[in-house]
Amino acid sequence: MRIKIDGQGMKVSERVQERVEKKLSKFDRYFGDAAEARVKFRPEGPQLLCETTFKVGKHFYRAEAISQQADEAFDQTVSIMEGQLRRHKAKFKRRAHDFAYLNTYMNEDLEDFEAEDEESYEIRRKQFPIEAMHEDEAILQMEMLGHNFYIFLNPDSGRANVVYKRRNGSYGLIEAEY
């Protein structure tokens, strides 16, 4: 697994870097060289936020945690990632043919993660026309509907875009590439 460690607005100590590499090395047996891990640390007021992302083929696993110490925040993200892998393993087994391409990225050692009770999800489907509008209008529509995201057609690019409300109260824009 390739590992990249970043500190935004701070320097990550050697001790923390070694700890991150050691902890993430246990995921090597599941993904091998096919995976990429990115760990970011940044100050959030008096605390530190750790964001850990795995990219395995087309799949992303992401966790973030906040704590006083970088070690604690990172440990929390690893714990969250393990839970995501357990849940994904259960889905993976139920729908093996849909995720067949993922077999090339995941080793058989994934058996070490015992599957949690299989959860069944009710998927509510909606269909609606995508309207052409600019970001400002899409944000207004999102706020009026009381949603935390809104899909729209960008008239400048002709592509589908998504505006969403971020945790800090600002807005984000996702521009699809296809």
Image: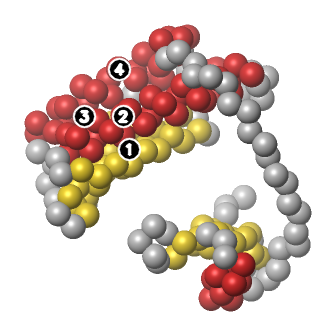
The answer to which of marks 3 and 1 sits earlier in the sequence is 3
Q: Quarter holding the N terminus?
A: top left
Q: CA distance from mark 2 to mark 4?
A: 11 Å
> In x, y percent, where is residue 58?
61, 39
Mark 2 crowd level (few <14, some 14–19, many ≥20, 10 Å Cα): many
> In x, y percent, where is residue 103?
64, 20
Q: CA distance from mark 1 to mark 2?
A: 8 Å
Q: How is the image coloured?
A: secondary structure
Instruction: Tell me the quarter of the picture where residue 82 sits.
Output: top left
Mark 3 crowd level (few <14, some 14–19, many ≥20, 10 Å Cα): many
Q: Helix, strand, or loop for circle 2?
A: helix
Q: Helix, strand, or loop for circle 3?
A: helix
Q: In this rendering, would 136 be left or right of 171?
A: right
- Which of discs 2 and 4 lies nearer the camera? The answer is 2
The answer to which of marks 3 and 2 sits earlier in the sequence is 3
* Amino acid type, residue under disc 1 in the picture: Thr
The answer to which of marks 4 and 3 sits earlier in the sequence is 3
Q: CA distance from mark 3 to mark 2?
A: 10 Å
> In x, y percent, where is residue 150?
69, 72
Circles 4, 3 touching at the beta carbon (< 8 Å): no
**Residue under numbered circle 2:** 78
Circles 1, 2 touching at the beta carbon (< 8 Å): yes
| Residue drawn 60% across the image and 29% down it | 88
**Residue under numbered circle 1:** 52
**Residue under numbered circle 4:** 26
The answer to which of marks 1 and 2 sits earlier in the sequence is 1
* Amino acid type, residue under disc 4 in the picture: Lys
Mark 4 crowd level (few <14, some 14–19, many ≥20, 10 Å Cα): few
Q: In this rendering, would 171 be left or right of 131?
A: left
Between 81 and 37, the one lying in front of the other is 81
Circles 1, 4 touching at the beta carbon (< 8 Å): no
- Give the numbered dot on residue 20: 3
